[in-house]
Image: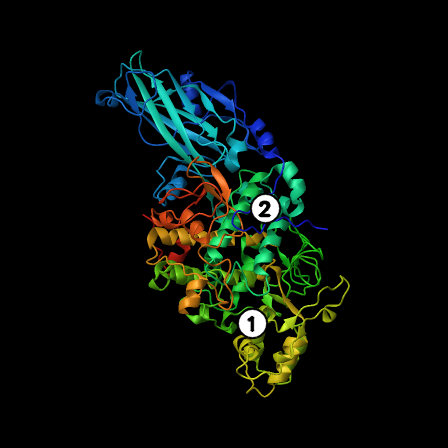
């Protein structure tokens, strides 16, 4: 039987107690030992001069794939010189004219030019002072000496670890870097290269001293900021892609208990994340993570917890984001996302190839080749929330297949956004409600007055800017393809448009009927039970209703027919109560089983950060359900007949978030309230945190105006949208 970890906490939830193995395993590997000298970079200059030596230190990463590296220096602009051999960040003005040191970092995956896009995007970052953890970072060093009588010989450096402990404590525990290096004459300057593998996010003080004579020394003392960099999927190197997907497969294949023993206490299996997401999203009366104001913050917390688990397996990994507006542009070419042709994404996009998320076999509706071939959905009849067949799927999903299922269609029809009926949640115009997310929909969310309040933004973000990805990947299958539905069309009882509307909205009707308790699912169906015998049972009100009933409203909002239709009862009975159908796994509460699920939520976080940077919210009010009960205005979730748990401002997120602790400066795992999670990821100075009460979970989060996350996004650019005539404001 599969074990269900207690991962759905209340405020003050308790962490699972596990052995302290990650610290032992990784700290042993990170001990630094000076082993000799080597020449690094500037090969031509070094060979000609014959005088440059580099103090080399072996710095293996936790995965052992970065090889040998020399220790790092600081980044940042100029240094100073002084008459003391002690490193100092200040000196006399006379000494300042003698020499300066410039240090610029880069790594094979992150050039100086590319890093500038990141540092220009965040107000708390400075050019040449940003590095990535767990990647060999090379620092180009230039020493300018104004006095020809002063000649540098050997320089010294020291890179200190900043805050120690926390979730990255095992990586930083034994980190230190110090030594000496020689510089080579390069024209009018002196130059050298050094490298280091920074172990984890944080601030690292760096000191460099270059004696110029017995009395004069050029000194540098600066901090280097280390963050994980989240990149768009197609901006990953081949190795980064493999590292991410391979780590995902470890989580998919290794149970939590075994993984904790092997990878450390922050390991959680994919199944654990599926269980918790399913508990929250598959509840009978309310979706605690979707259809409300908590969508962005709840999924940001989930992504943070998942990222930490991936990093337990491979600490070089950060979760990428999927900018699906690129796919909308490449397939649609108009940047708007209309029409049927967006199903071609799954034929033409590099993301749905064997190297990425796999090619879907059109007959079996699963991936049959590559790392995701024949991936199975966990099955256990002891699961608290599960499908009738015992799978970790939504209770309303009667898919009998054990494999992760994708349809990319709805009941056999190519998805066409014009057939999705409109709810009150839309962006720009109703016809776009279920279009493939486009440049236009993301522009509308971040650049227009309509979504300048946090309420409108958070309530709508889950729909056209995001939700259709789940639908287009997962789709809907079962006996709604062909069979009775098509027969009703062939016999003239419904029009082609009515057939298409039924197929496109079938998923919403099924989920909403379950939540309205007008259908009941079987308690259990054995693996060999035919799906026609594992059908839900309709309440008599499904067919026998009047126009004022809740069920009539569901039928009208999903199928766009009412009792004035000549064949109303026959259509409802046959389509709703006799035809078994079900969503693909990406289109329901089981969606975390799909690797492509995980990069789509950082996209929302990135958009929210971007909006904070270029067009801040004019109102950040977050109403709670009690206020809604009192006034009747602004419910924090769409199902306003409930208490909207999970979507209120002071509801605690289901998952931990990794954030910087205000007192120690270390990164810790905390359960935050929704409002705290929103502000912790806000890159713009703001005093909102002053008014946020922390649950009794330990130390406060960072002071007001402080960005508390261990990652940043590589840039905020949508260059492909320019070709579609949609211009996103540049971050200055």
Q: In this view, does 236 lie to the left or right of 537?
A: left
Q: Residue at x 56, y 86 (%)?
A: 565
On the image, the x and y values in percent for residue 657 come to 50, 46
Q: Is mark 2 on a helix, strand or loop?
A: helix
- The disc at residue 230 is none
Q: In this view, does 46 lie to the left or right of 471?
A: left
Give how far across and how far down residue 373 sits, in percent: 67, 52
- Looking at the picture, tell me which residue is in the foreground, 224 or 6: 6
Q: In which quarter of the image is residue 534?
A: bottom right
Q: Which of marks 1 and 2 is in front?
A: 1
Specify which label sits upstream in the sequence, 1 or 2: 2
Q: What element carries label 1?
A: helix
Query: Residue 624: x percent and y percent?
Result: 43, 61
Q: Mark 2 points at which residue?
A: 245
Label 1, residues with CA under 10 Å away: few <14, some 14-19, many ≥20: many
* Residue that numbered label 1 is attached to: 505
At a point 34% along the width and 25% down the height, the residue shown is 220
Q: Vertical placement of 515 versus 17: above or below?
A: below
Q: Position of residue 369 (x, y in %)?
A: 66, 52
* Marks 1 and 2, how far apart at CA: 33 Å
């Amino acid at each position: 039987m599969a074990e269900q970890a207690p991962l759905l906490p209340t405020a003050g939830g308790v962490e699972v107690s596990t052995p302290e193995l990650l610290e032992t395993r990784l700290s042993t590997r990170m001990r630094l030992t000076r082993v000799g000298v080597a020449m690094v970079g500037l090969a031509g200059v070094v060979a000609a001069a014959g005088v440059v030596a580099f103090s080399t230190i072996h710095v293996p990463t936790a995965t052992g794939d970065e090889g040998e590296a020399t220790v790092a220096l600081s980044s940042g602009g100029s240094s100073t010189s002084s008459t003391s051999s002690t490193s100092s960040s200040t000196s006399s003005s006379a000494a300042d004219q003698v020499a300066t040191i410039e240090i610029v970092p880069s790594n094979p995956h992150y050039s100086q030019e590319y890093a500038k896009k990141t540092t220009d995007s965040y107000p708390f970052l400075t050019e040449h002072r940003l590095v990535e953890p767990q990647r060999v970072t090379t620092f180009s060093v230039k020493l300018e000496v104004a006095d020809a009588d002063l000649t540098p010989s050997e320089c010294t450096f020291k890179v200190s670890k900043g805050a120690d402990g926390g979730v990255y404590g095992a990586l930083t525990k034994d980190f230190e870097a110090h030594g000496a290096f020689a510089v080579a004459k390069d024209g009018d300057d002196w130059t050298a290269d050094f490298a280091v593998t920074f172990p984890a996010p944080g601030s690292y003080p760096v000191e460099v001293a270059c004696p110029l004579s017995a009395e004069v020394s050029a000194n540098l003392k600066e901090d280097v900021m280390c963050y994980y960099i989240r990149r768009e999927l197609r901006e990953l190197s081949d190795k980064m892609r493999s590292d991410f997907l391979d780590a995902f497969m470890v989580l998919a294949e290794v149970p939590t208990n075994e993984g904790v023993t092997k990878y450390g206490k922050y390991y959680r299996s994919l199944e654990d994340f599926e269980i918790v997401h399913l508990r929250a999203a598959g509840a009978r009366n309310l979706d605690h993570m979707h259809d409300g104001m908590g969508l962005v913050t709840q999924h940001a917390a989930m992504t943070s917890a998942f990222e930490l688990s991936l990093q337990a397996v491979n600490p070089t990994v950060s979760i990428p984001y999927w900018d699906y507006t690129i796919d909308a542009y490449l397939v649609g070419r108009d940047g708007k996302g209309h029409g049927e042709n967006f199903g071609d994404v799954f034929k033409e996009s590099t993301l749905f190839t064997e190297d990425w998320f796999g090619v879907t076999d059109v007959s079996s509706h699963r991936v049959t080749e590559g790392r995701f071939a024949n991936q199975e959905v966990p099955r256990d009849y002891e699961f608290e929330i599960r499908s009738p067949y015992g799978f970790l799927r939504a209770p309303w999903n009667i898919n009998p297949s054990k494999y992760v299922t994708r349809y990319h269609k709805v009941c056999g029809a190519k998805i066409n956004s014009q057939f999705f009926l409109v709810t009150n949640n839309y962006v720009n115009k109703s016809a776009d409600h279920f279009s493939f997310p486009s440049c236009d929909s993301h522009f509308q969310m971040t650049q227009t007055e309509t979504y300048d309040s946090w309420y409108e933004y958070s309530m709508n973000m889950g729909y056209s800017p995001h939700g259709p990805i789940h639908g287009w990947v997962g789709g809907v299958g079962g006996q709604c393809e062909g069979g009775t539905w098509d027969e009703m069309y062939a016999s003239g009882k419904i029009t082609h448009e009515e057939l298409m509307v039924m197929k496109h909205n079938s998923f919403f009707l099924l989920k909403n009927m379950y939540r309205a308790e007008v259908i009941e699912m079987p308690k259990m169906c054995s693996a060999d039970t035919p799906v026609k015998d594992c059908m839900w049972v309709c309440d008599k009100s499904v067919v026998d209703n009047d126009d004022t009933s809740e069920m009539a409203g569901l039928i009208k909002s999903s199928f766009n027919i009412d009792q004035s239709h000549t064949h109303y009862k026959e259509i409802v009975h046959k389509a709703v109560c006799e035809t078994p159908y079900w969503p693909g796994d990406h289109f329901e509460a089981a969606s975390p089983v799909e690797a492509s699920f995980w990069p789509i939520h950082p996209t929302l976080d990135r958009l929210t950060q971007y909006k904070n940077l270029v067009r801040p919210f004019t109102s950040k009010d977050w109403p709670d359900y009690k206020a809604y009960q009192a006034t009747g205005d602004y419910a924090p979730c769409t199902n306003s007949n409930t208490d909207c748990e999970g979507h209120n401002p002071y509801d605690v997120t289901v998952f931990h978030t990794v954030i910087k602790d205000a007192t120690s400066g270390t990164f810790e795992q905390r359960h935050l309230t929704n409002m705290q999670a929103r502000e912790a990821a806000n890159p713009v100075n703001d005093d909102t945190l002053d008014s946020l009460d922390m649950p009794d979970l330990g130390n406060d989060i960072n002071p007001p105006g402080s960005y508390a996350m261990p990652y940043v996004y590589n840039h905020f650019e949508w260059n492909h949208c320019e070709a579609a005539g949609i211009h996103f404001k540049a971050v200055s």
